[in-house]
Amino acid sequence: MATNDSYEPGTPSWVDYMAADLDAAKTFYSTIFGWELDDQFDPDGNHIYTGATKDGKRVAGLFAQPGELADQGVPPMWNTYVTVADADAAMEAVTAAGGSVIMPPMDVMEHGRMASFLDPTGAAFSTWQPRNHNGAELVNEPGSLVWNELVTPDIATASEFYAKVFAWQAADNPMGDEEYTVFHLADTTPEQAIAGGMAPPMPQIPTHWSVYFGVQDTDATIEAATGAGARLMGEPQDSPFGRTAHLLDPQGGAFAILGLGNSS
């Protein structure tokens, strides 16, 4: 079992889902990934967050989309969080590198400090300064986060931005006939990549950070997901790392899966 209790600054460490219909999202994702869910409330009894666990380990979160974002036409989406040592310093680095602030740093109770941004190519991402919550405790296993991937038509601009903000190094790593970029921390090698980047495979796909979850069997998960109302985007693809597929959940939120075979 691949578990983590801490993350180096600059490493994607957490994902959560902003849902138009939280109850429906909880049912869908817990069904296809086998998650256990823990609803969290404020002192007045208002729901504020749902934590998802697998085998007793934190894997992801879900929350209700604020009404003002729905009114602006912002779709349901998975959010990628990158660990930082100092959320306020990270905001300064983001703006200096040409990014924009969606939400300035704020404390999340005793758990940590977060902020949300847009990179110069239009992809939304968040930063996380951990306190009591270090991020995903289970990774690279069925039902957990396995990869974060930037989808943007301007990899060069994005690479320069993330190098300035997180000291990421970019390296070309073609996947067959497809161009692909991997990002790794400054003191590591491309073989130790912590995220990837690619151009949109189809013109209508917006710039975004894609989230991959591990599954035991890609085709069986596709069948379960589409049976629960999801849509398959394109055909599944075999890669050196496993069989992948991209889907839209019943609310239109994009996510991807990677088959891990007999991983346990």
Image (spheres, helix red, strand yellow):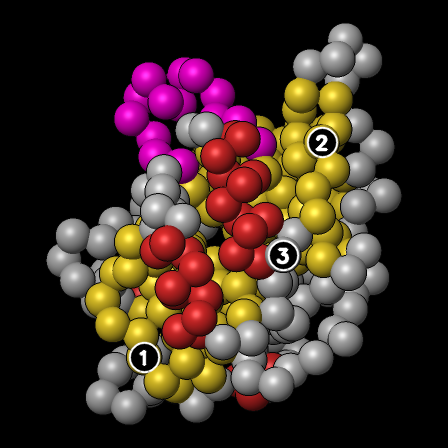
Where is mark 1, residue-wise?
237
Measure the C-alpha gap from mark 3 to mark 1.
23 Å
Measure the C-alpha gap from mark 2 to mark 3.
16 Å
Where is mark 3, residue-wise?
34
- In the rendered view, would you say 102 is above or below 148? above
Does any portion of residue 134 appear in the rendered image? yes
Q: Residues within 10 Å of mark 2 (few under 14, many from 20)?
A: few
Q: Amino acid at mark 3?
A: Gly
Q: Please, what secondary structure does the residue beneath circle 1 have?
A: strand
Q: Amino acid at mark 1?
A: Gln
Please name the residue shown 43% across and 90% down the image.
240
Q: Please, what secondary structure does the residue beneath circle 3 have?
A: loop
x, y percent for residue 147: 52, 68
| Residue 258 part of the magenta-drawn span | no
First reached walking from the N terminus: tag 2 or tag 3 = 3
Asked whether disc 3 touches disc 1, contact meaning CB atoms under 8 Å apart, the reply is no
Front residue of 101/230: it is 230
- Image quadrant holding the N terminus, namely bottom right
x, y percent for residue 43: 81, 13
Q: Amino acid at mark 2?
A: Asp
Residue range in magenta is 63-76
Where is mark 2, residue-wise?
39
- Image quadrant holding the C terminus, namely bottom right
